Image (cartoon, helix red, strand yellow):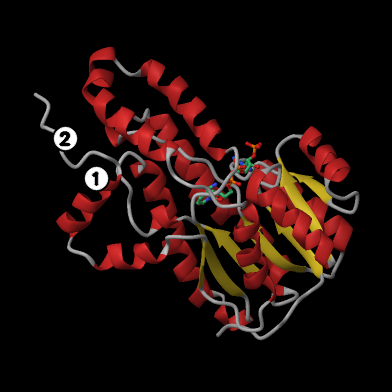
Amino acid sequence: MATTTQARSGAVLITGAAGGIGAATAHRLDASGFQVFAGVRRSSDGEKLQRDISARITPVLLDITDPVSVAQAVETVTRVIGNAGLVGLVNNAGIIVEGPVELVPIEEVRKQFEVNVIGHIAVTQAFLPLLRKTRGRIINVGAPTGLVSIPYLGVLSASKAALESVTDALRSELRPWGISVSIVEPAATQTEIFQKSAAAAQQAREQVPGELMQLYAPALAAVAKASASQSLENPDVVVAAIVQALTSRRPKTRYFAGRGLRMIAVLRLLPDRTRDGLLLRALGLANAQPIS
Ligand SMILES: NC(=O)c1ccc[n+]([C@@H]2O[C@H](COP(=O)([O-])OP(=O)(O)OC[C@H]3O[C@@H](n4cnc5c(N)ncnc54)[C@H](OP(=O)(O)O)[C@@H]3O)[C@@H](O)[C@H]2O)c1
């Protein structure tokens, strides 16, 4: 185990804290006595956090895909905390690029990786000097899709799988400095991420030729029906796992947050075609016929 430090105060940076899991985490950590730096992309979102959650929260303008923004965020945080360092970095920002791999415009594929993978690496690199000062902790927010690739969410799954991989390597690489690295795998959770991704997919599909869209229409209808029927967790379930990773004496490497995730471990052990069949059945596509 990397460290036995049990921080319950000190400075923490959360990326993607404008809403959803990030804002809920900011709320909980602020209430617990941490000094919270909340990464937001618009100053109006920072003002909203201070107004609605706590005036103690320090918003930090941070687009994790923009190197200048990342460098400025380091300066902003350093200016406030001086030599004290960070006790935690929660790499939470994320987007979902949805749809069959064939239909996702390649710039959307790049965007998925820029936000869900490269942005987290950039932020981690930039803030490691501050984390090293306190033997701080890194908590990456992954997803079960990183452990089992879900059809029609293949691009998202690939990005989250890459984040799993980076997390595993960092855990060993940062051990010499006592910096623990955990990944939290939220079950489907009630946030705006799904509405945002549906709107982005709708827009992206305007670039896709109609005849190609037609080929996927039955599958997309089935997937939409299956996702509409999934039950969603409260973000507090994920927040509890993030807090555990940040504060427990012996942080786990991986936290599953929400119901139904034991299935993931089972699915990973199954032969590929058996797993494919189960996933297609769950999406209502078990009996789909070949399209010519
Ligand atoms: N909700 C779920 O069911 C679920 C399940 C598994 C994993 N997760 C993961 O949980 C994390 C939080 O998601 P959420 O559900 O809370 O969704 P959310 O409410 O949409 O929050 C995502 C946050 O990421 C921010 N973000 C997007 N692109 C960014 C960028 N380039 N730079 C900085 N911030 C950026 C968003 O900011 P803007 O508001 O400015 O766009 C937003 O604040 C994500 O990593 C997601 O993959 C969620």
Q: Which badge, 2 or 1, comes first in the chain's sequence? A: 1
Q: Quadrant of residue 67?
A: top right
Labelled pair 2, 1 in contact (Cβ < 8 Å): yes
Q: Is residue 128 above or below residue 91?
A: below
Nearest the eye: 33 or 282: 282
Question: Which image quarter has ligand 1?
Answer: top right
Label 1: element kind: helix
Q: Which residue shows up at 43% across the image and 32% down it?
A: 108
Amino acid type assigned to the residue bearing label 1 in the image: Leu
Left or right placement of residue 87 versus residue 52 in this view: left
Identity of the residue drawn at 15% across and 38% down: 287
With respect to residue 46, does 279 lie above or below? below
Image position of 64 with respect to 166: above or below: above
Q: Is residue 35 visible?
A: no
Percent x, y for residue 33?
85, 67
- Residue positioned most to the right: 55
Where does the N terminus fall, quadrant-wise? bottom right
Q: Can you tell me whether the CB of the residue at mark 1 lies under 8 Å from the nearest atom of ligand 1?
A: no
- Asked whether residue 140 is in view, the answer is yes
Q: Residues within 10 Å of mark 1 (few under 14, many from 20)?
A: some
Q: Which residue is mark 1?
A: 280
User: Going 48% across and 40% down the picture, which residue do you hit?
Assistant: 96
The residue that appears at 65% across and 60% down in the rendered structure is 239
Give coordinates of residue 103: x percent, y percent: 31, 28
Query: Residue 257: percent from the left, percent from the top?
Result: 53, 62
Please, what secondary structure does the residue beneath circle 2 have? loop
- Residue 248, by quadrant, is bottom right
Q: Is residue 18 left or right of residue 225?
A: right
Which of the labelled discs sits on residue 288, or is there none? 2
